[in-house]
Image (tube, rainbow, N blue to C red):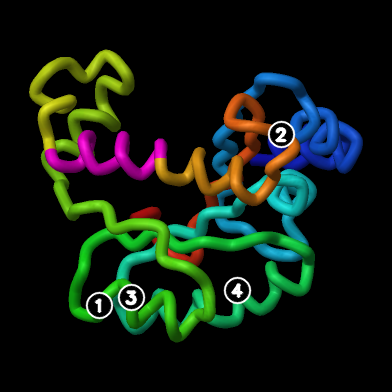
Amino acid sequence: PDQVVGALTRWGDRGAAELAAAEGVRAFVDCGRLTAASPALTLARRAALTVLVCRPRLDEVNALVPAVAELTAAGCTLGLVCVGSEPYLPAEIANAAGIPLLGVLPVDPRAAAVFDRDGLDSGRPFRRSALAQTAAELTEYVRSRAAEILPGAGAGAAAVAVADAAPGPPP
């Protein structure tokens, strides 16, 4: 973690600006637990869209709302992806946070474990899972939204930052 923080700090706004302006580059950047003090904020601020990810649970919603205020004030364009649809409805979570709901990923521990273990070599069983199919659809939707937000960039160039919205283990 210290090496990542150091690299992001040195790279700074100049590197983030170069990534955002790169012709024909599509980048999905995992910013981890993003705050206004995070060295990854320069990436999130320059991204066409910063996607916050949370479960629709009270503890994560309580962390999401102030994070949205902080990141919006820092200049980020935000959207929400929920993992699962209970105990609260994802649309209610997005409404409470004041940001658009981009999608809902299914809770699928088995498929997630396969992907965590094997990555992109997960094979056909993973690709056929509801998690993989929904993630693929969501990726296309987020990419098209990013292109709408930065119309001059076209569909070929869009930087998207992805961050966990709440403390604790990733969704």
Residue beneath disc 1: 89
Q: Is residue 95 left or right of residue 66?
A: left
Q: Which of marks 2 and 4 is nearer the N terminus?
A: 4
Q: Earlier in the sequence, mark 4 or mark 3?
A: 4
The spot of residue 77 in percent (x, y) is 66, 60
Residue beneath disc 4: 68
Mark 1 vs mark 3, CA separation in Å: 5 Å
Mark 4 vs mark 1, CA separation in Å: 18 Å
Mark 2 vs mark 4, CA separation in Å: 25 Å
| Label annotation for residue 153 | 2
The spot of residue 27 in percent (x, y) is 60, 30
Q: Label 2's element?
A: helix
Query: Going 41% across and 58% down the picture, which residue do you hit?
Result: 102
- For the C terminus, give its image quadrant: bottom left
Decide: is 71 above or below 109: below
Decide: is 50 above or below 82: above
Q: Nearer the viewer, mark 2 or mark 1?
A: 2
Are the residues tagged 1 and 3 within 8 Å (C-beta)? yes
Main SS of the magenta segment? helix
Magenta segment, which residues? 130-140
Q: Label 4's element?
A: helix
Decide: is 51 above or below 16: below
Q: What type is the residue that disc 4 sits on?
A: Val
